[in-house]
Amino acid sequence: MGMDNLSPEGTPLASGPLTRAVLEIDEYASGLGWDQPARLFALVDTERLRTEEPGLAGQLGLDQQPDGDRGTSFTPVEQDEIPADAPLDEFLGTIAWPEAVDGCAVTVERLMLPPSAEAAVPEDLDDDQLARWVAEHPERSEVRMTVAVLRGGERESALRLREKDSPTEVLTGADLVPGLAEALAATFEE
């Protein structure tokens, strides 16, 4: 692959602000390592954050960016920890974002099976038994999913497999994790 289509930071120029935010969160989560709890982020327009919350923008290092980089971009702001004992979709159902928040994102780890293995899942397992069965399956793969939605409905997601843990192997797409994207989108509904 030639380097022609890469910007100086190494991200494809074609990627939009939401894709860049998702990849930034994926990179941040990657730095924390695996076996992490789910994390929730508010996405805030970077320029608005600089104007309205200069103190916070300074803490996040946003006042260091040269003026040339100031197209539309979103700054992920990590929220308080998601309670480990609450199912993620139930927890998301309790959230109401303030006006200043343009979008939100969550990063969560899951175990996935290839379609060939899914056909062999024993029936009549409860959730705990199913989780244990998947966790012990030799073909399982661990995946980190980062899913983001904007108030206007735009969505993006990134998947990173534990066995292919490198930035060049991250898969992105709007509809990779539709259920989680729906749950996030619902946090913006009145």
Image (spheres, rainbow, N blue to C red):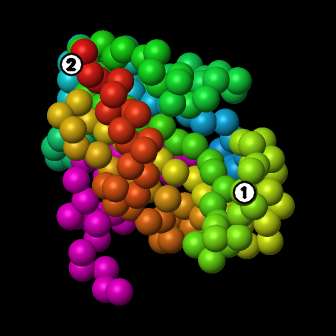
Which quadrant of the figure contains the C terminus? top left
Question: Position of 9 compared to 36: left or right?
Answer: left
The 10 Å Cα crowd at callout 2, few under 14, some 14 to 19, many 20 or more, is few
For the residue carrying disc 1, how many other residues have a C-alpha within 10 Å: few (<14), some (14-19), or many (20+)? few
In the rendering, at what x and y percent does residue 33 appear?
69, 49
Dot 2: what SS?
Answer: helix
Of residues 1 and 97, the one nearer the viewer is 97
3D distance between C-alphas at marks 2 and 1: 56 Å
What amino acid is at disc 2? Thr
Q: Which quadrant holds the N terminus?
A: bottom left
Residue drawn at 38 percent across, 42 percent down: 181
Residue 66 can be seen in this image: no
User: Of 163 and 132, which appears nearest the observer?
Assistant: 132
Image point (79%, 66%), residue name: 137
Q: In the image, what residue type sits under mark 1?
A: Glu
- Looking at the image, is mark 2 or mark 1 earlier in the sequence? 2
Q: Is residue 49 magenta?
A: no
Tag 1 residue: 123
Q: Is residue 159 in view? A: yes
Q: Can you tell which mark lies on residue 89?
A: none
Q: Magenta residues?
A: 1-30
Q: Position of residue 188 (x, y in %)?
A: 29, 23
Please say if 56 is above or below 69. Answer: above
Q: Residue 13: give x, y in percent of width and height.
A: 22, 64
Q: Is residue 3 magenta?
A: yes
